[in-house]
Amino acid sequence: MTNGDGGLAVRARNFQLRIGVDGTPFAGWPDRDLLAAMEAAGAKGVGVGCRGGGCGRCRVRVVSGEYTTGKMTRNHVSVEEEKNGYGLACRIYPRSDLVVIWEPLQPGTPR
Amino acid sequence: MAMRGVLRPGFIQLRVLDMAAALTHYIERVGLEEVCRGADGRVYLKAWDEFDHHSVILREADTAGLDLFAFKVCSEDSLNSFKQRITDWGLAVDEVPAGEQPGLGRRIGFTIPSGHRIELYHEVEMSEAHPTIVNPMVWPKEPHGMGAIRFDHGLLYGPNIDKVEEFFTKVLDFSVAERINDDQGAMALWLTVSIKAHDIAFVRYPEPAKFHHVAFLLENWHEVGKAADIITHYNISLDAGPTRHGITRGQTIYFFDPSGNRNEVYAGGYAYYPDNPTRSWTMDQVGRGIFYYERRLNESFLSVVT
Ligand code: FES
Ligand SMILES: [Fe+2]
C-alpha cells in the first residue's frame, strides 16, 4: 500500500496514463493502481466507487498498454472479458503507458 | 409494544474477495473479534457488546456483496408462526438445519421481492466473549480499532420496494420510520422493528439483491471522529463523512472494506416508537436527508453497490 506521496518523485519508472486516446496524460507507477493514480493527479474520466475491486463502477476497457491486475469481482469482469482487455481501474497496475476507456455496466446487465 | 416477534438484526453474511485483507479490516480496524472459523472457510465475527455467538460472517468468493441478512425472533413458536405467515403471503420458505453455522439453531429462509435472502432464527448460543453479566464491567475487554459496539442495521438495494414494504410491515410487523417518495411511489424506506430509527433500509434499484452498506454502532460523535482518524491513518477507502444523516439523525461515516463492500459506523439517531408518524421526504430535499451538512448526495450514493 502506498502511504501518501512520499518518494514518488524519485521513482525510476513513471508511465503516462490516459483516459481516452485524447485524454490529458497523468503519471502512473507499477505499484499504484490506475484509479488511485487518476485521483492523485486530480484527473477525471473514470467513475470512482469502492476502490476495492468489488463494485464495478471503475470498469474500463484497455485500449493500449501493458498491465497487471489484482482480484476483481466477476460480476463486472468475467474471465473472458479480462482476456479481452476489460478490467477494473482500481485493480489495474500499469507496466507501460496506458490508454483506457470508462465502460461501466448498466445496473441489471445480464451476466 | 413490548418487543416480541422479530427482535433485531442478528447476523449478516458478506462475500469478500480476499479473506486475509477482510479480516485485517473487520478485526483490526472496525474492531470486531474473531469467534471461530468453519471447515468451509467462513469466518465468524462479533462485536464486543453482543451476547450472541456471532453477528458477521465473511465468505471468500469471486464477487463481493451480500449472501444473507438474518433477524433473531423471540421464540421457536414465533419462528413457526412467521413461517406460516410468510408462506401465506406467498413466499417459498426453506429450512436451514441447526449447526449449518456454529452456535446457531434452526433457521428459516426466503427471498423477498427485492431479491435478497432473509433468514429468521431464534436459537443461538451465548458467545464466550459476551458482555459481563454479574456486577458488570463497562466492557469485557477494552475495545480496539473503531470499537464497533454492535452490528446495527443494513441498507439494501433492489426492485419492488413497494412489495418489500408490504412484506415487512404486514408479515414481519415492522414500521416505516422514514421514507422518500418520488412519482413512482416509494424510492427508499427505513424500517424498524424496535426503538431504533431503523433496523433495515431499502432503496429502489433496477438490479436485484444488491448491497449498499452494513452499519456498526459507535458510542458518540467523538468516536465517529476517531474512526475517521483510523480511516485516514490506514488509507481505508472513504466514501462520505464524517457527517450526519437527516434521515434517522445518525452521525456517520461511510467507507469501504478491501473488497468494496460499504461499511458505516455511526452514533446517535432518535428513538422510534410504534405510534410515531412516518417521517417523509420529497425528492428535492433528498440531499439533506442523506447527508445533512453537505445537503447533496455524493456521486456514489445511488450508483455504488456490491
Ligand atoms: S471502484 Fe469499485 S471496483 Fe473499482
Ligand atoms: Fe446506515
Image (cartoon, coloured by chain):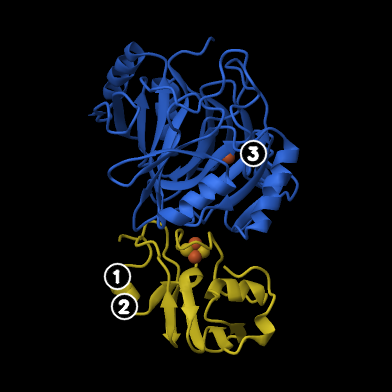
Chain colours: A yellow, B blue
| Quadrant in the picture for residue B266 | top right
Is circle 3 on the same chain as circle 1?
no
Report whether residue B153 is seen.
Answer: yes
Instruction: Kindly state the secondary structure of the residue where label 3 is placed.
Output: strand
Give above or below for B257 relative to B74.
below
Q: Residue at x 44, y 55 (%)?
A: B20
x and y percentages locating residue B40 in the rendered image: 28, 45
x and y percentages locating residue B201 in the rendered image: 51, 36
Which amino acid does the dot numbered 2 rest on? Answer: Lys
| Quadrant in the picture for residue B219 | top right
Which amino acid does the dot numbered 3 rest on? Answer: Tyr
Instruction: Look at the numbered discs 1 and 2 and tell me whether their residues touch, using CB distance below 8 Å.
Output: yes
The yes-or-no answer for disc 3 within 8 Å of ligand 2 is yes
Q: State the separation of the CA atoms marked 3 and 1.
A: 38 Å
Residue behind mark 2 = A83
Please give left or right for residue A88 compared with residue B250 in the image. left
Q: Residue at x 39, y 27 (%)?
A: B167
Instruction: Kindly state the secondary structure of the residue where label 2 is placed.
Output: helix
Residue behind mark 3 = B266
Q: What's the chain of the residue with tag 2?
A: A
* Quarter, ligand 2: top right
Instruction: Kindly state the secondary structure of the residue where label 1 is placed.
Output: helix
Which label sits on residue B302?
A: none
- Front-most of residues B62 and A103: B62
Residue behind mark 1 = A79
Report whether residue B202 is seen.
Answer: no
| Quadrant in the picture for residue A62 | bottom left
